[in-house]
Image (tube, coloured by chain):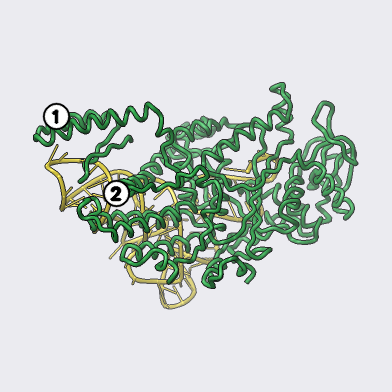
Chain colours: A green, B yellow
Amino acid sequence: MATATITSTDSATEKDTCNIRIYNTLTRQKEPFRTVQPGKVGMYLCGPTVYAEAHIGHMVGPVIFDTIKRFLVYCGFEVTWVVNITDVDDKLIASSTKRGITMSQVATEMTMDYLANLQSLGVNQIDHLPRATDNIDEIIRFIEELIQRNYAYASGGDVFFDVTRDTDYGQLSNRTAESQQGEGGEAASRKRSSSDFALWKSAKPGEPAWDSPWGQGRPGWHIECSAMSRRILGKTFDIHGGGLDLIFPHHENELAQSRCCHGVPMVRYWMHNGLMRAATSAGKVGGRSERDSESDATEAPQADVSAKISRSKGAGGLAKQIEQYTGERMRFFLLRSHYRSTIVFGDEGLEEAGQALTAFYRLIQRFERISGEPFYDSSSKAGESSRELHYATTRTAGNHFIREHGQGELMAEVGRLRTSYLEKMYDDFNTGGAVSDLFDMARAINRFVDQSGLEDAKKRTNENLTQFASAMSVLRELGAVLGLFIKQPRKGANDDSVKLVDQLMQLLIQLRADARTTKNFATADAIRNGLTKLGISLQDLKEGTIWEKA
RNA sequence: GGCGCUGUAGCCAAGUGGCUAAGGCAGUGGAUUGCAAAUCCACCACGCGUGGGUUCGACUCCCACCGGCGCCUCCA
């Protein structure tokens, strides 16, 4: 009922948006999605510590959250999505010292890298990107409140959170405070108990520092998220996400800080994505396999071993990978698996994803060729805002869908698949399952085009063309929810060289067509085989020949 | 050692206490084509790590075992 107050007047919409269920790490089960405020969703994703270039593993969370936001918006929610940038920490200090530039310069450089990669993957739904260093006052205020409430104590220029005061500590990661080692190092001597963690760290000479009631220093790792999420989303917000590896200690500590400070739960749903691994046989992401030394003495190791992706192992070159495979392909690859599962990242999987995506691209081209209408929204803002996603989900059910798209066998099938797709998404954002409905939809549309003779200009009827266009609009709509099929895949189509290639191809195609007309198949095949060797395939259609570069 | 995840066809990957276990890649046969390509159609796991148990019935629940992995220190 809380979510019932969305703008739509359609009662079916209420019911269906209440069908969303989310796996909550805190309770270790799927729960019905109920927002704090009716019709509104606040979500926070832990972003990167910007001390080095991002790698593909950093993209999993943003891509899935971008998709979640798209879906929630599609369902009619007003969504505010926050991704924090951690721009102060030990590694940043180390990097700046090593490179002889300021910490802020390192942070700016790496933040730009991160954002550029997000953009390439179509992640463009983020509303706030707060940086820790822009929120020092808020952080200090937060720490002071914790001290006032006796949950934190200052000790020799540091401030620690007193874990023993929080009887609920450990719920998220399902572990007890006593069992924790806690941070070691020289700061340990200033703690009351070993599992206490730093809220504020005193500065050593030469380190970046801010004034505080406890002297010069900088915030601890966890406090920024508590402070910034409260500032933007409030004391209790709906969804908090991050990689599985953040559950402990980061999210456990965040949770403790916020709950103890406010006396209310911090988050309704804790979501954690699985970690990505690098295929070591074919893929190169993880660098050399570190396990070879111990295991390949006797038997040959399995070829499909995978290695952890991390910056320390030399993972990187994400921009190059995106350039090689295209961002849409990588996004599609990520979305084909469930967000909570481990994804093995490698060339093999990306090749396959590329093959699969091509089927959609061909259908889209087929549509543009036959209808003469563009499939993609040509406006520069396409996909940039979530406005076009505002579309009540459940127009599928019953009348809405038919009213909007008309009747017909194809649309009946498309409507059925759309419902199936939405059901998958309601169930903890099962993007992998939803994609299968898109494939089914593509096949249904292709079948329709084949059977209704739309390839033949003479047989085209307005009714069939309309139905074709309607079906494609549903495909576009559902694709957009996943952040797919929003923009023309090949960029640079207006380059002179691209134009020239196309003109040359038209010339070859004409020569071959002439040869075929005179039944000179040897020449025709010589042209085609020669092109095949260049990775170009031809397709002879009723209306002429088209070409495609592999 | 503690906490947790996972094992579905050649590969990737959804999913359900009970009709024929999604979808993709690869493969096979057919329609189509001058031949192809693309597209469509059909086929492709009598079985869902192994062994028990619960149940009228389990791939789905429980136990054990075997295998893979994560966290417990920084990590998306």
Q: Position of residue A235 (x, y in %)?
A: 75, 57
Identified at 84% across, 48% down, the residue is A143
Pointer 1 indicates a residue of which chain? A
The answer to whether the residues at label 1 and label 2 have Cβ atoms under 8 Å apart is no
For the residue marked with disc 1, what is the amino acid? Thr
The mark that comes first in sequence, 1 or 2, is 2
Q: Position of residue A399 (x, y in %)?
A: 43, 71
Which numbered disc covers residue A53? Answer: none
On-image quarter of the C terminus of chain A: top left
Residue for badge 1: A523
What's the residue type where badge 2 is placed? Ile
Cα separation, mark 1 vs mark 2, equals 29 Å
Image position of A263 (left or right of A381):
right
Q: In the picture shown, does residue A262 fall above or below A15? A: above
Figure label count:
2
Circle 1 crowding by C-alpha within 10 Å: few under 14, some 14–19, many from 20: some
Residue A100, above or below A294: above
Image position, residue A126 (x, y; %): 61, 47
Instruction: Name the residue at 20% across, 53% down.
Output: A458
Which residue is situated farthest in the front direction here? A462
Which is nearer the eye, A232 or B8? A232
Can you identify the residue that label 2 sits on?
A370
**Quadrant where the N terminus of chain A lies?**
bottom right
Splitting the image into 4 quarters, where does residue A37 fall? bottom right
Label 2 marks a residue whose chain is A
Q: Nearer the viewer, residue A228 or A399?
A: A399
Placement of A206 over or under A391, stated as above or below? above
Location of residue A50 (image quadrant): top right
In the rendered image, is residue A349 in sight? yes
Please state which of the two labelled residues, at mark 1 or mark 2, is closer to the viewer: 2
Element type where label 2 sits in the image: helix
